[in-house]
Amino acid sequence: MSDKSRLQRVLEQGNFSLTTEIGPPMSADAQLVRKKARMLVGAADAANITDNQAAVVRMSSIAAGILASQEGIEPVIQMTCRDRNRIALQSDLLGAWALGARNLLCLSGDHPSLGNHKQAKNVYDIDSIQLLQAVARLQNEGVFLSGGKCRHPPHFFLGATANPFADPSELQLMRLQKKIAAGAQFIQTQAVYDVEAFEQWMARVRALGLHEKAYIQAGIVVNKSVKSIEMTRLVAGMRIPESYIDRMRAAGDAAAEGKAIALELICRLRQVEGIRGIHIMSVGWEEVVPELAGESGLLPRPAAEQEDETV
Amino acid sequence: MIVAEQKPIGDIAASLGSFKNIVIASCDTCVTVCLAGGEKEALEIQGLLTLCDRESGAERAYTVVNIKRQCDDEFFEGENDVIARADAVLSLACGAGVQFMAEKYRSLPILPALNTKFMGASRGLGYWTEMCQGCGNCILERTGGICPVSRCSKSIFNGPCGGSQNGKCEVSPDIDCGWQLIYDRLRAIGQLDRLSGIIETRDWSTSRDGGPRSLALPDARVGKEDERVV
């Protein structure tokens, strides 16, 4: 039996992927995750499950991912290096795979001082690139970071992030190269608003041939309110042209305007050479995702059947 | 050097408890340079504690002694008698000095007057910043002489993270992004290629993570057979 994730099959079979995001609740309420997950079934190929994003305690990304998967949406488990040392990271990877998770996104994680437990000891035993390298070795060579053998390693579809707008750009591009060299098979970018700047970045990515080594998915944030876009603008490494903020402020119905902006962005980003998918971050507005998917012509999602490997 | 700062005087006064005869011990090295624990500061603290006592009605006697280095046995000679007569010692040394005294004077309470902060360097009058975490495994040759362990808030080795913007760290606009500094420096000296490879997972066992550390130089220990060698 093939253990390939649906997202991996969608991309490998040449389809344009659509992924989105579920933020687990700040509680132990499984129903909240299930409800969000059900809204996304059929509307996206997979949903990222964030790992205590912004360093705020939430339900575990693995646990919430399994709940989502029980409702029929495939999870992309986000795993940050902020809270777990290499022992805990590898242990959680084994557990996530054993429970059925098939996609993994490796991140550094927001610093604890940005969250609500500022007194926490931060870990960062290894960084996101070293995590990618560790998971790839575990999967390909069956070896833990200790050098010890793993008899039944996981085989995640391995992802990483890229920020086209973060500084210093030359070094950030080198990091993207490192991530792909370390084993990243797909890349999700930071939210794009400035499509011109993004196109310039993609030209550099293409010049390095990176778009042929990993599936690059452009991220977008869909804002429901003026406050939402103003908050998004404060995120490090985010670049939002003033025109979008003006449009949100001038609109009678900010939510409708936010959705219209997202639709425009999806439409433009789909045409950027080398982009293989869109990643929608709905920041708690999950119900807009099926609408965006439908109105941008990205539905129905491909079946991406499991290939028969018994021959 | 080791950089430290004084605890609030109220906390120091409270830590004195019922002790009556207090020796205030300054330290003449790092903490003198960073204006936290030198002889001048010891005299200031003596004055402030005397004021506190006057307000609270406590009756205490203070004696200031100046130790050249509180982390080395040879510098206590000449002060042993006055220290031995005290009820407690208020040490203005770094954490190493306080602990060294506590080992040396086993029956005497040694109280810290400082919070020891970091290993750093002077960046102008009255300003110090952290430069080294003593991880025991230096890679400054790869990073342009700027340490990712101490200068990056996440101590990452293949930075910067996505939170670097305009040369600043996501933790605070007052903190330079360590990886921006590394990049700028390597670029300026034409060695950016040093960053092209992945820096592999670190062995933190040389750091505090491997447990309390020690260093024994065999050649320097000739004639010290009577001491316990770790």
Image (tube, grey):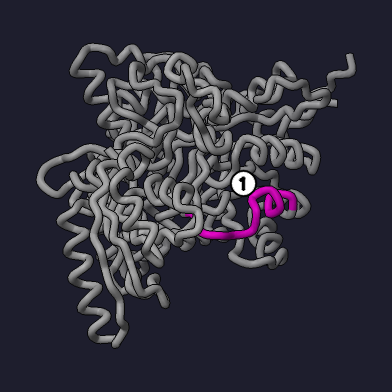
| Above or below A135: residue A189 | below
- Which amino acid type is shown beneath numbered disc 1? Ala
Point out residue B166 in the picture as x, y percentages from the top left corner: 23, 40
Figure quadrant of residue A85: top right
> Would you call the spot at circle 1 few (<14 residues within 10 Å), some (14-19), or many (20 or more)?
many
Residue A257 belongs to magenta span? no
Point out residue A153 in the picture as x, y percentages from the top left corner: 77, 26
| Rendered residue at 37%/52% (across/down) | A261
Total count of labels: 1
In the rendered structure, the answer to whether residue A76 lies left or right of residue A100 reads left
Magenta stretch: give its range. Answer: A55-66
For the question of whether residue A296 can be seen, the reply is no
Point out residue A201 in the picture as x, y percentages from the top left corner: 33, 27
Q: Mark 1 sits on what residue?
A: A47
State the residue in front, B65 or B111. Answer: B65
For the question of whether residue B149 can be seen, the reply is yes
In the rendered structure, the answer to whether residue A165 lies left or right of residue A83 reads left
Query: What is the chain letter for disc 1?
Result: A
| Rendered residue at 20%/14% (across/down) | B189
| Above or below A202: residue A298 | below
Figure quadrant of residue A309: top right
Q: Secondary structure at mark 1?
A: strand
Residue A63 belongs to magenta span? yes
Q: If the image is split into quadrants, where does the C terminus of chain A sit? A: top right
